[in-house]
Amino acid sequence: MSKVEFNFFYLFSGICRLAGLAFMFSASILLQILACALYNNWWPMLSALMYVLVPMPCLFFGGGSTQFLISRDGGGWIDAAKFLTGASAVGSFAIPIILRHAHMISTGAMFIEFTSFIIFVCTVLCFHRASLEDDW
């Protein structure tokens, strides 16, 4: 294989990764909307607020990188960012449970919310793995 062919396949691989991440994220948002629309109840959209809050500590305290989440380095701001990331991630999982317990959403909507959250977490983990590579 020549160098030009190798660069083409390497570029195509990067585009496929990016397209896969975009597909996973859009599938998560679609399930979020379906959990609301199928049961004619828009309370499950409350957990979509947490999807916005999860990356905020990375942006504000981590410099836009996810590297600090796996490091053992401490400090006031880094520990605060780790805590806020964990709290918002737990909130994303807890809000559908609380809404179901209060009989505000049905069980089916709760399980669709869980599926949406799992796909969202897998998307974030895949993005983190891809961003650790030097070639990205």
Image (spheres, helix red, strand yellow):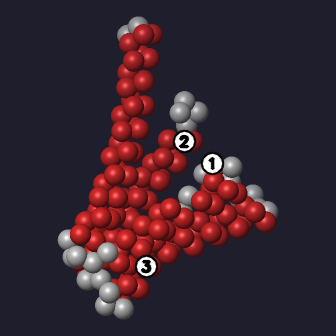
14 sits to left or right of 54: left
Query: What amino acid is labelled 1 in the image?
Result: Ser
Query: What residue lies at 42% left-to-right and 67% top-to-bottom?
Result: 48
Q: Position of residue 92 (x, y in %)?
A: 46, 72
Image quadrant holding the N terminus, namely top left
42 sits to left or right of 63: left
Q: Please rate how many residues cluster around mark 1, counting C-alpha atoms within 10 Å: few if below 14, some from 14 to 19, many from 20.
A: some
Q: For mark 3, what is the residue?
A: 95
Give the tally of numbered discs: 3
Q: Up-down: is 37 above or below 124?
A: below
Q: Is 118 in front, or is 33?
A: 33
Q: From the image, state whether disc 3 or disc 2 is nearer to you.
A: 3
Secondary structure beneath dot 3 equals: helix
Q: From the image, state whether disc 3 or disc 1 is nearer to you.
A: 3
Q: Up-down: is 40 above or below 12?
A: below
Going from N to C along the chain, the mark reached first, 3 or 1, is 1
Query: What amino acid is labelled 2 in the image?
Result: Ser
Q: Up-down: is 133 above or below 113?
A: above
Q: Position of residue 96 (x, y in %)?
A: 38, 79
Secondary structure beneath dot 1 equals: loop
Q: Please rate how many residues cluster around mark 3, counting C-alpha atoms within 10 Å: few if below 14, some from 14 to 19, many from 20.
A: many
Q: Position of residue 10 (x, y in %)?
A: 42, 24
Going from N to C along the chain, the mark reached first, 3 or 2, is 3
When asked about the image quadrant of residue 135, the answer is top right
Q: For mark 1, what is the residue?
A: 65
The circle drawn on residue 131 is 2
Residue 68 makes an appearance in the image: no
